[in-house]
Amino acid sequence: MSNAHCKLWRDIPDAPRASAASLADHVIQPSTAAHLDRFDRVQLEDVLQACRSSVSLSAAGRVLFDRSRERKKSANDADRLRKYLARFDLEWGELKERLRQN
């Protein structure tokens, strides 16, 4: 790689790992939050925002999977979201309670 390319990579600033008011930090275990990649944290934060503003797991799933659900024969958005949340040891009822507290 040329020196010009290396310089470009060096000049990319590191983004903060998490904001002070991160939803993820309020709802998942600190040990899990500490190991989240930036990519995973951004995705999780968006999922948590959708969950916070939705009245049900199904409603949140419809918001989050609005495009991919059209390509499926049987769209079970609630199950897809349930499985995603389980990766972080979260379940809908407990998550909604934690989100109400913040």
Image (tube, rainbow, N blue to C red):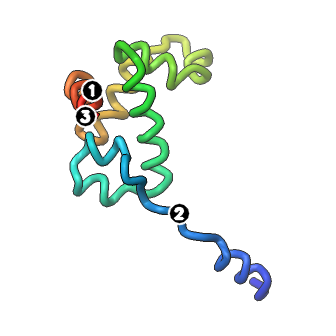
Task: Give the mark toward the camera: 1 or 2.
Answer: 1
**Residue for point 65% across, 71% down:** 12
Task: Give the mark toward the camera: 2 or 3.
Answer: 2
Asked whether 45 or 68 is in front, the reply is: 45
Identify the element where label 1 is drawn.
helix
Mark found first going from the N terminus, 1 or 3: 3
Task: Give the mark toward the camera: 1 or 3.
Answer: 1
- Kindly report the distance in space between the C-alpha atoms of the residues bearing marks 2 and 3: 26 Å
Identify the element where label 3 is drawn.
loop
Query: Tag 3: residue type?
Result: Leu
How far across and how far down the image is residue 18, in percent? 41, 55
Query: Tag 1: residue type?
Result: Arg
How far across and how far down the image is residue 38, in percent? 47, 56
Q: Looking at the image, is 102 positioned above or below residue 20? A: above
- State the quadrant of the N terminus: bottom right
Q: Looking at the image, is 76 positioned above or below residue 28? A: above
- State the quadrant of the C terminus: top left
Query: Tag 2: residue type?
Result: Ala
Q: Classify residue 66 by image quadrant.
A: top right
Instruction: Decide if residue 73 is on the left or right side of residue 1.
Output: left
Q: Which mark is residue 100?
A: 1
Residue beneath disc 3: 90
Mark found first going from the N terminus, 1 or 2: 2
**Residue for point 73% across, 76% down:** 8
Q: Are marks 2 and 3 in contact (CB under 8 Å)?
A: no
Mark found first going from the N terminus, 2 or 3: 2
Residue beneath disc 2: 15
- Kindly report the distance in space between the C-alpha atoms of the residues bearing marks 1 and 3: 15 Å
Instruction: Decide if residue 12 is on the left or right side of residue 35.
Output: right
Q: Are marks 1 and 3 in contact (CB under 8 Å)?
A: no
How far across and how far down the image is residue 64, in percent? 50, 25
